[in-house]
Amino acid sequence: MLIKNGTILSPGTKKEWQGDLRIKNGEITELGTLTPDGEEKVLNAEGLFVAPGLVDVHVHFRDPGLTYKEDLHTGSLAAAAGGFTAVVCMANTKPVMDSPHLVRDFYERAKKEAIRVYTAAAVTKGLEGRELTDFSGLSQAGAVGFTDDGIPLLDEKLAAQAMLQAKELKLPLSFHEEDPAFIEKSGTNQTAPAIAEDILVARDCMLALSTKARVSIQHISSKNSVALVRTAKALGADLFAEATPHHFSLTEEAVKEHGTLAKMNPPLRGEEDRLAIIQGLKDGTIDAIATDHAPHSREEKARPFFEAPSGIIGLETSLALGVTNLVRPGHLSLLTLMEKMSSAPARLYGLPFGTIAPGAPGDLVLFDPEERWIPERYYSKASNSPFTGMPLYGRVRATICRGELIYNPFSL
């Protein structure tokens, strides 16, 4: 495959240039001004940006056990439509991803998908927060990290032990930071205040500093948590922080307009928090953008607010929200946005993505940052998004994984 006339963004090498690239046998083989070779497929990327396939290290594909919401196939279709070629699924499936045979079964089924689908394993058995899983066995089965995402790990000693075990395996631990002692009801800034997040972020920043483990703070939402991560990094902690598109795009005011479609954990907070997240992305405190893609059925989201489940879908709008709310206002360059959405998240899990160079995987996204569009229909099984009907800039025109065109609705 030959891709011609694109503006190439390589966040892994921090370079941007105009040119062509060739993919053979699933990897990039040549860069420069190239001519078609025989019968090879040619994509004209004139007017488009060509970047490494996006990497999302925080998705819920609900498979196994909750596949009426999403499954490996529909989740992969949504990912490809959003420009993602690799994702890391969370462990809160049914049954919980807490045993090696479940991890092996997951990968056997995931092999059928067009994108690269990875999974994290649970930190504790059954997500119950009492007993650590078999980290070594889960790692050998293919788990790329450990998380009880959706449920905070409240036992400080157990959290430290988990960090030490993960460090031995050179794998990251990812933490959902909300202490239920401070939460009246989930889903709003008033009933699930920032202190619930801040207190656990502070604890895990200090535990990470003490254990020297690689620790990821998931879906950061509070200005104080951003400051805590910044301080802990300055002290030498091996911390990684992720922010979601909804937390840098919306405030708690969106709940009034969108109801349960703007309900998530942690909740949307104030404008000061949103701006602090953007500043954290600008100065490197926050390493990556991750969607926390959390599909739910229409019937579930139609329940009364505090009875409805938390979470929104995000794979198909993530790039556009980054362009609309980070690049166009001048907070980030397109190259830095690509770093936050490909090379940085790939580094967390030691995945070989995020660079355009000879020998790199043939995983790419082609997009137009100037194209205005309105999300209306989704490849996901779910449609629980506050961004439906909202004009956005930045549209995916094609997605390529392993050298194969897996999303091309515009027939480039």
Image: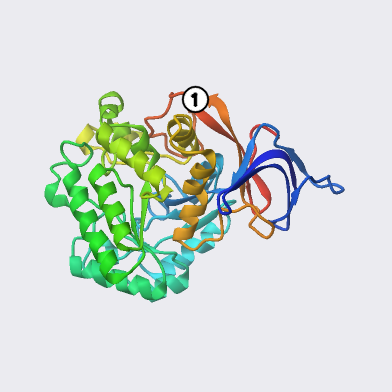
Quadrant assignment, res 127: bottom left
Residue 239 image position (x, y, % from top left): 34, 59
Residue 228 lies, with reference to residue 266, above or below; the image says: below
Q: How many marks?
A: 1
Residue 87 image position (x, y, % from top left): 48, 52
Quadrant assignment, res 304: top left
Q: State the quadrant of the C terminus.
A: top right
Question: Type of residue at label 1?
Answer: Ile
Residue 292 visible in the snapshot: no
Residue 338 visible in the snapshot: yes
Q: Residue placed at 85% from the left, 47% from the top?
A: 39
Residue 159 lies, with reference to residue 250, above or below; the image says: below
**Residue 84 in the figure: left or right of residue 67:** right
Q: How is the image coloured?
A: rainbow
Residue 4 image position (x, y, % from top left): 74, 40
Residue 238 image position (x, y, % from top left): 35, 63
Alpha-carbon neighbours of circle 1 within 10 Å: few (<14), some, or many (≥20)? some
**Which of 329/322 is in front?**
329
- Residue behind mark 1: 374
Q: Residue furthest right?
A: 38
**Which of 336/129 is in front?**
336
Q: Residue placed at 42% from the left, 47% from the top?
A: 290
Residue 25 lies, with reference to residue 270, above or below; the image says: below
Q: Residue placed at 45% from the left, 55% from the top?
A: 88
Q: Residue furthest front?
A: 234
Numbered disc 1: secondary structure: loop
